[in-house]
Image: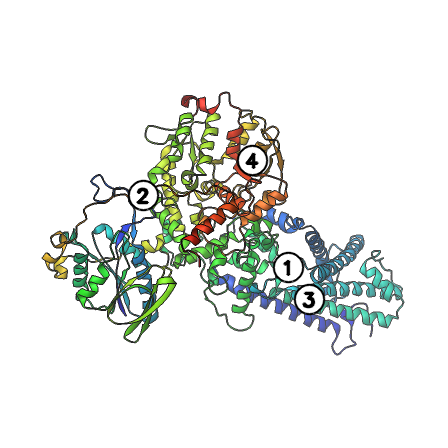
């Protein structure tokens, strides 16, 4: 199976203190460290496991700049067969639809049976997967937390209310957005990254994709970010002052009152 | 026909000489073949460089092999073993000459004729008797008293009792046959009117002589020849059977101990003979299949006597984690026997993880070193565990709980993913900064001493207090010191011990450059893990001391004086951190410091000093989610309570995390507390002025 995984480089929320910039329309990026978006990493691991079961190859792709090459290398070290960086000044300022358009043009240039995205980027809005599917006229399943390959189709599931699972069948080719927890991504160590340090990663620009200039980038963006704000601190939590037993009983009572206990 | 030696025996189908010569040749040939087969995996194994320091190695053979140094740590079993060992050594020449006598009747061991020979006979009469009695006692222990450490939980395989008792039985038969042979020979000679030596009073031969002395010469002859045959057959059977089980150590222990690791606190390189800068050429890291072990590590598998002391001392095993060092070895030995059979072809290259070992088993180890400290045969475990982890890291087989801190160490230089620029924030706490300013190294600031803080003391709110106490104590003794601040990264101690060698090298190289650029003459740290890393894992850095050593020296020199202990109801106990105690032998300095505080009542736990019980492990082990029945820390806190203490003093920030958590988990808040040695010193120092009034200028920086 030929699998494409769309990945994205994001500031790692566990390793950064996110602060707003002076203008209030973005975050301070000077001292941030980045990593591959967590859900995307699960998607790559899932692709690798499917490939190892049924054969084929895994390609990872990202839309960004040369800094984004680091996450492609990380995914190559994980075991992806190919990596492609899509980068062009014309793409900067793209909104979700713009990114989906770029990816659509890329997908049309190749032959992929299965396209995976993470369910959502840490700093994203969970738009691209669905839009990409629509643009390609492929079936789409979101929030996928298990994949079984069957003949010409997949059996996928997602978690629904109360921890239950909903199983669907979906025809190939298709687009899936992958939920974290679908697998346990393998570790990529320093050694793995070093081993792929000199693997060439092709960069494709707008002309390589044959994309429509008016459909991407800032000119085409119809969603613009205007403001960030930090919510004001609300009043403090209710503090319990009692012995351990009293507090435990009180917590139990509060949880029961909110319907947390059946 | 009767004669004077079994060699002259002609009663059976073949002459004795031929029969016994045949048994000799067959026995020795079988043994040689089996040993050659056992050596096959060692030849296919990885390299291991153990051919240096000949003199030191011989000294260690004298101490640990000939001197049986570790054995008395388990009193009864140890003393039994020493008797058996001495017996075997004494009996070696006798066994050899007895074997030769079957072929050449007049053989006398050179140097053992005349009076010396008689004295030797008396000594060995007793030796055989004592060894026999030891076999009886050992068998009774195994069968009746069944010490817990010999039992084999179902998940690790079958009990080894039958094999152990069988081997004891064989040795007992050997001793009996030997004694009966000597007794019947002497009795026969006496009957023939030849001059005979007296047998040792109350020894087995002496008793046998009384038992058979009144028999006819023909009976004595028959007894003599039968005893000889039994002795010879048992001897060779035992010789050839030992390489199939726990008694192979009789042959291998000398080599295991000679080639044993010399340096504490160190780790083996990824591949012997491959320098760090050429590691990229190594195709696979660590141990993934049996043949990736080094030959010495395989020799360890053969040498293990399955005495259970390692597992008995292993905190992971005590806490119910799926790890017992003993079974790491016995499972590997069983693997070797199965995949390198005596007959037939070797079938190798099975993956070990998921085969004989589970992932959790290998991640469960805190590398505390209790097993290695206890092993009478100096079997190594930490290097094997780390090699297996290197293999798992290389395969990407790492628990999610460890992936995040490893990634953060790579990108931020600390496992918490905190900002580099905040690494020195602990020194900026307002009330602290007023009383004691800490210099951060830069182009303007230089200093004689570097305080290497390391990640947990830099970032953890609770542990920052240890950092501040260390700074205040260093200031008090007038030390010109500084910290690296944002230029410091994690020492990488646990990164290395969790098998991520290349990340460790990156951290080490970064710190080494920063330390060298600082121009400091020496390093002090309050973190035993950083201490061990800087001392053993780093190269070309200035000498490093743990703060407890610095304080002890200043106390001895009279530069630090303490106030009287305020609360007389406090009973203190010192918990030895593994990387200060066992791995670096710093046991006395912290105790010296504690005992210098007037009025301080101090007790010891049963498991202290080199038998200290790990609190749960440091560094990345804090992130790992082990499968366990209880926390090691809880066990440790209970040991402190049992010793009658209500304050646990430790000298390691990771111990503090584990012990403070354990006090809460054990529900002992209010009854037990924990304090770092440096914090206690900081609180107890008799200062001329109280720290609040102290001017920064007179207080260090």
Q: What is the spatial separation of the Cα atoms under label 1 and label 4, in whole angstroms?
A: 36 Å
Residue bearing the label numbered 1: B150
Q: Image height check: is A150 above or below B559?
A: below
Label 1, label 3: how far apart the Cα atoms are:
15 Å
Could you tell me if the residues under marks 4 and 3 are in contact, i.e. CB atoms within 8 Å? no
Dot 2: chain letter: A
Corner quadrant of residue A183: bottom left
Helix, strand or loop under label 1? helix
Q: Name the element at disc 3.
A: helix
Q: Can you identify the residue that label 2 sits on? A: A17
Contact check, label 2 and label 1, Cβ < 8 Å: no
Whether callout 2 and callout 3 share a subunit is answered no
Graded by Cα atoms within 10 Å as few (under 14), some (14 to 19) or many (20 or more), the crowding at tag 3 reads few
Local packing at callout 4 (Cα closer than 10 Å; few below 14, some 14-19, many 20+) is many
Mark 1 on the same chain as mark 4: yes
At label 1, counting other C-alpha atoms closer than 10 Å, the crowd grade (few under 14, some 14-19, many 20 or more) is some
Q: Residue drawn 46% across and 57% down? A: B388
What separation in Å lies between label 2 and label 4 (alpha carbons)? 39 Å
Q: Whole-percent x and y of residue B205?
A: 81, 61
B658 lies left or right of B570: left
| Image height of B243 relative to B438, above or below | below
Q: Chain of mark 4?
A: B
A90 on left or right of B547: left
Q: Which residue is mark 4?
A: B590
* Mark 1 and mark 3 on one chain: yes
Q: Quadrant of the N terminus of chain B?
A: bottom right
Residue under circle 3? B166
State which mark lies toward you, 4 or 3: 4
Q: Nearer the viewer, residue B644 or A88?
A: B644
Does residue A111 appear anywhere in the picture?
Answer: yes
Inter-mark Cα distance, 4 to 3: 48 Å
A78 w.r.t. B442: above or below: below
């Amino acid at each position: 199976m030929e699998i494409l995984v769309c990945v994205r480089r994001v500031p790692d929320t566990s390793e950064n203190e996110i602060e707003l910039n002076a203008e209030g329309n973005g975050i301070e990026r000077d001292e941030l460290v980045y990593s591959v978006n967590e859900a995307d990493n699960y998607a790559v691991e899932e692709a690798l496991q499917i490939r190892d079961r049924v054969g084929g190859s895994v390609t990872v792709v990202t839309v960004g700049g040369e800094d984004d090459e680091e996450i492609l290398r990380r995914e190559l070290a994980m075991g992806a067969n190919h990596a492609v960086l899509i980068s062009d000044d014309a793409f900067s300022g793209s909104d979700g639809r713009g990114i989906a358009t770029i990816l659509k043009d890329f997908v049309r240039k190749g032959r992929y049976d299965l396209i995976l995205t993470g369910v959502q980027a840490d700093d994203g809005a969970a738009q691209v997967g669905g839009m990409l599917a629509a643009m390609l006229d492929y079936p789409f399943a979101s929030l996928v937390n298990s994949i079984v390959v069957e003949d010409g189709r997949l059996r996928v599931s997602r978690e629904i209310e109360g921890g239950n699972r909903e199983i669907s069948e979906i025809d190939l080719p298709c687009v899936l957005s992958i939920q974290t927890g679908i697998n346990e991504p393998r570790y990529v160590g320093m050694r793995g990254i070093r081993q792929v340090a000199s693997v060439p990663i092709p960069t494709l620009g707008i002309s390589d994709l044959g994309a429509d200039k008016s459909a991407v980038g800032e000119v085409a963006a119809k969603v613009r970010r205007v403001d960030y704000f930090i919510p004001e601190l609300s009043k403090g939590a209710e503090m319990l002052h009692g012995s351990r037993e009293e507090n435990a009983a009180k917590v139990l009572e509060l949880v029961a009152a909110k319907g947390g206990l059946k | 026909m009767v004669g004077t030696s079994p060699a002259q025996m002609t009663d059976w189908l073949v002459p004795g000489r031929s029969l016994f010569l045949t048994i000799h040749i067959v026995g020795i040939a079988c043994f040689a073949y089996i040993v050659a087969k056992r050596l096959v995996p060692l030849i296919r194994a990885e390299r291991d460089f153990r051919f240096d320091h000949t003199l030191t190695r011989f000294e260690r053979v004298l101490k640990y092999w000939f001197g049986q140094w570790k054995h008395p740590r388990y009193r009864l079993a140890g003393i039994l073993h020493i008797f058996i060992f001495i017996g075997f050594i004494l009996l070696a020449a006798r066994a050899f000459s007895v074997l030769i006598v079957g072929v050449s009747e007049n053989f006398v061991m050179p140097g053992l004729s005349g009076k010396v020979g008689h004295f030797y006979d008396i000594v060995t009469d007793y030796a055989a008797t004592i060894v026999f009695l030891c076999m009886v006692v050992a068998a009774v222990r195994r069968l009746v008293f069944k010490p817990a450490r010999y039992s084999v939980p179902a998940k690790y395989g079958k009990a080894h009792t039958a094999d152990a008792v069988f081997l004891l039985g064989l040795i007992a038969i050997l001793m009996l046959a030997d004694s009966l042979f000597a007794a019947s020979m002497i009795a026969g000679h006496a009957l023939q009117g030849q001059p005979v030596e007296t047998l040792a009073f109350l020894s087995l031969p002496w008793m046998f002589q009384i038992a058979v002395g009144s028999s006819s010469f023909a009976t004595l002859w028959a007894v003599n020849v039968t005893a000889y045959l039994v002795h010879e057959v048992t001897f060779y059977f035992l010789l050839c059977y030992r390489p199939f089980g726990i008694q192979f150590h009789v042959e291998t222990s000398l080599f295991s101990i000679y080639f044993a690791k010399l340096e504490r606190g160190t780790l083996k390189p990824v591949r012997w003979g491959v320098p760090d800068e050429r590691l990229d050429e190594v195709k696979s890291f660590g141990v993934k299949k049996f043949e990736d072990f080094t030959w010495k590590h395989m020799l360890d598998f053969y040498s293990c006597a399955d005495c259970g002391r390692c597992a008995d001392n292993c905190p992971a095993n005590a806490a119910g984690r799926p790890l017992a060092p003993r079974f790491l070895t016995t499972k590997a030995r069983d693997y070797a026997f199965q995949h390198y059979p005596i007959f037939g072809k070797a079938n190798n290259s099975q993956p070990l993880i998921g085969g004989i070992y589970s992932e959790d088993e290998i991640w469960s180890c805190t590398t505390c070193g209790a097993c290695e400290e206890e092993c009478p045969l100096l079997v190594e475990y930490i290097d094997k565990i780390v090699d297996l982890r290197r293999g798992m890291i290389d395969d990407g087989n790492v628990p999610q709980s460890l992936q995040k801190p490893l990634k953060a160490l790579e990108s931020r230089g600390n496992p918490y993913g905190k900002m580099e620029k905040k690494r020195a924030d602990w020194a900026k706490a307002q009330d602290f900064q007023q009383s004691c300013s800490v210099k951060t190294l830069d182009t303007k600031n230089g200093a004689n001493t570097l305080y290497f803080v390391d990640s947990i003391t830099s970032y953890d709110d609770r542990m920052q207090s240890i950092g501040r106490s260390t700074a205040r104590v260093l200031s008090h003794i007038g030390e010109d010191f500084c910290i690296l601040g944002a230029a410091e990264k994690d020492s990488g101690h646990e990164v290395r011990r969790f098998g991520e060698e290349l990340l460790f090298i990156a951290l080490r190289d970064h710190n080494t450059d920063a330390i060298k650029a600082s121009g400091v003459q020496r390093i002090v740290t309050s973190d035993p893990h950083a201490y061990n890393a800087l001392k053993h894992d780093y190269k070309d850095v200035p000498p490093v001391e743990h703060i407890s050593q610095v304080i002890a020296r200043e106390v001895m020199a009279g530069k630090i004086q303490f106030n009287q202990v305020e609360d007389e109801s406090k009973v203190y106990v010192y918990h030895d951190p593994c990387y200060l105690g066992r791995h670096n032998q710093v046991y006395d300095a912290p105790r010296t410091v504690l005992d210098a505080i007037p009025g301080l009542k101090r007790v010891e736990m049963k498991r202290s000093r080199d038998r200290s019980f790990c609190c749960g492990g440091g560094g990345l082990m804090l992130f790992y989610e082990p499968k366990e029945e209880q926390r090691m820390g809880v066990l440790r806190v209970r040991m402190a309570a049992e010793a009658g203490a209500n304050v646990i003093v430790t000298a390691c920030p990771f111990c503090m995390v584990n012990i403070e958590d354990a006090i809460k988990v054990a529900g002992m808040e209010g009854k037990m507390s924990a304090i770092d040695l440096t914090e206690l010193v900081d609180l107890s120092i008799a200062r001329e002025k109280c720290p609040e009034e102290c001017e920064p200028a007179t207080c260090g920086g």
